[in-house]
Image (tube, rainbow, N blue to C red):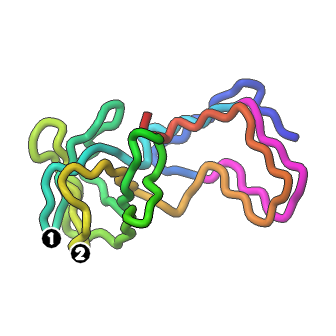
Amino acid sequence: MGQGMQQTLLLGNSPATIFKPFHCQGLTITSLAIDFDPLPFTAGYVVNVSTTYLDVQVVPPHKADIGRQVRAILQYDPIEMRPAFSPNAYEIYQTPPSNVNTSLVSPGILRIPLASSSIFVAGDPIVARYMFDRHAIDAQDVTDFTVQSIRIYTAWC
């Protein structure tokens, strides 16, 4: 058992894996907070769709991060406060165009370049992830794994 003793781990510009347990059992991680600054994603509602970009009205507390590359976009369920899960929910992963980054169309409206056309439509709540290959907690082949009293500041609240 490991305890964070009510500590907060602050991660800067490059998201990283904090805990990566492999092949273990009876593991408990408890009593700490992980705070990403800046967040490795932004979120909001699609307001305009093109074959080469999405325009998104960014929802506070998120920021319209300009000059970034979006590598994944998922549909979000703002009622359940989690990724959307249904037969009609969708998510895309992309290698973003190298010659364009996110930009501000107008105050609070972020333009996200797309590598190819998507099925997102105006009104969709989305989370745009700048990176998708790093997770704060990434366990593999672990049994009896408990995560208690952990606050990770990387969720649309």
**Residue 125: % across, % down:** 31, 48
Quarter of the figure with the N terminus? top right
The correct choice, above or below, for 44 with respect to 20 in the image is above
Q: Are marks 2 and 1 in contact (CB under 8 Å)?
A: yes
Q: Is residue 17 left or right of residue 114?
A: right
State the residue at coordinates (15%, 46%).
Answer: 104
Residue 51's disc number = 1
Give me the residue at 66% from left, 51% from top. 137
* 78 lies above or below 139: above
Residue 101 x, y percent position in the rendering: 23, 59
* Residue at the spot of label 2: 116
Callout 2 amino acid: Ser
- Taking the image as shown, residue 73 lies to the left or right of residue 101, namely right
The spot of residue 103 in percent (x, y) is 17, 51
Residue shown at the point (43%, 48%) measured from the top left: 40
Label 2 CA crowd tier, 10 Å (few <14, some 14–19, many 20+): some
Q: Quick one: quadrant of the C terminus?
A: top left
Which is more toward the observer, 89 or 51?
Answer: 89
Q: State the image quarter where residue 64 is shown.
A: top left
Residue 55 versus residue 109 in the image, above or below? below
Q: Of helix, strand and loop, which mostly describes the magenta segment?
A: strand
The residue furthest front is 87
Q: Is residue 35 magenta?
A: no
Whether 22 is among the magenta residues is yes
The residue stretch that appears in magenta: 17-31
Residue closest to the eye, 51 or 82 = 82
Q: Earlier in the sequence, mark 2 or mark 1?
A: 1
